Image (cartoon, grey):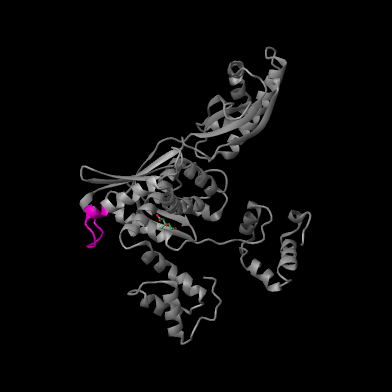
Amino acid sequence: MPTIKGFSKLSKEAKIEWIVANYLENNQEAIEFLKSYWHEDKVVQKLHDEFIENTVSNFYLPFGVAPNFLIDGKSYCVPMAIEESSVVAAAAKSANFWLDKGGFHTEVIDMVKVGHVHFIWSGKDTARLQTFFDSIRQKLIEGTNHITRNMQQRGGGILDIQLVDRTADEPGYYQIMSTFDTCDSMGANFINSVLEEYSKIFRNELENSDWLEEHEREVQIVMCILSNYTPQCIVRAEVTAPIELMNDGDEMSGQEFVDKFCRAVRIAEIEPYRAATHNKGIMNGIDSVVIATGNDFRAVEASAHTYASRNGKYSSLTHAEVKDGQFRFWLDIPLALGTVGGLTNLHPMVKFAYRMLGNPGAAELMRITAVVGLAQNFSALRSLVTSGIQKGHMKMHLLNILNQLEATEEEKVKIVDYFKDNVVSYSAAVDIFCKIRGIEKPVVASKN
Ligand code: MEV
């Protein structure tokens, strides 16, 4: 089994050679393959090389756009980076549907971030720890001034610091819980730096306290870390329309459509199996905007799913109702996004995405992203309760199948045309492909 010490210190070329020699049977074409994905502009490539450790090439994702999003009266063409064929099409379809119905409306409910110093205290009397904590609260704030000064100048900083007693769940376990306003940045580095500074001040003050007992001056700092669960960083996106405008072509009346639609949402509210898929569809839209705008989709996913379980049972992030003849559909979601810092000022495509969006601040990006999540869910449910999901999904997936079969451009045109009136499935695509090419079965080994 090949192993290596000091891999990260090798040049990029040497890293590739090592991989190819040890894992790719010394195949020189593999070297050329990896290099063919390098950016021709050396400056741009160097940027990518330095995003992470051990970069050997780039990994492309399609960068698509969904136009016609009307959000709070402003029109957007939204950037989306995603590999799943039907997602951008579904968002764009939804944007179009709502365009002449007043578009999407949003509200940023709050933008508070949170972090904790998790520690174990050997004292027995929580009230005494609380008294001590209250006496040093101001020192914690002042002692982190060198970190918070810039953020304060931008209008943010520390909002609050509390001592939290978690000893009922774990002996000796307490937290310093602090909330933050990180303005237009996501704020992870800022928060973590402040927390680490808190822990040093806290330990120092505790160990040197002149009124705590000897055993009360001992503390074990377990860790200092922000929480990716941000239930106080919430945005709401919603749409409303009179029921009669909610008809699905001639197929279904507005009333029938909203009845089925609301039932589908209700099922996701009460049934975790469905909620997971329902929310996954929402995250198709959210993640693709989050990636295109250089934000951390893992953080957003973690928060969204934790929020979806906040009442003790995993449930839908969207809700729907019909009241006084009006259909209303909305999404409440925690979105801790930043438009400054991180990749946002570095990645060329991210910078382009921001320019296209009119350089929004974090609150505006929260609104746009939530809307795309809602739009995505609307399109998915609309298909699910009418034609079924596969019709549109497979139509979008058709080109992937044809590319797998290595169909020529001419064959693709013929096959796409054929499927204008026929239901797409993998086997139907293979059949028509073979018929057009005059072969019995495809030569390309398929993984399907
Ligand atoms: C597929 O990526 C997403 C859907 O399954 C979402 C849903 O079922 O609501 C279509």
Magenta part of the chain: 246-258
Q: Nearer the viewer, residue 346 or 312?
A: 312
Rendering coords of residue 46 (x, y %): 65, 56
Q: Quadrant for the N terminus, please.
A: bottom right
Residue at 38%, 49% in the rendered image:
374
Residue 133 lies left or right of residue 426; in this view the side is right
Image x and y of residue 169, in percent: 57, 30
Please determine whether, in this image, residue 247 is positioned above or below residue 160: below
Q: In this view, does 12 lie to the left or right of 405?
A: right
Asked if residue 121 can be seen in this view, the reply is yes
Q: Quadrant of ligand 1?
A: bottom left
Q: Which residue is drawn at 42% across and 62% down?
A: 86
Q: Is residue 423 above or below residue 121?
A: below
Q: Nearer the viewer, residue 331 or 412?
A: 331
Let me know if residue 429 is in the magenta part: no
The answer to whether 332 appears left or right of 305 in the picture is left
Residue at the extreme right: 5
Report x, y in % for residue 274: 41, 51
Compared with residue 398, is residue 350 higher up or lower down, i.e. above or below? above
Residue 253 belongs to magenta span: yes
Residue 206, quarter of picture? top right
Tally of numbered tags: 0
**Residue situated in front as seen by the camera: 70 or 89:** 89
Extreme residue in the top direction: 211
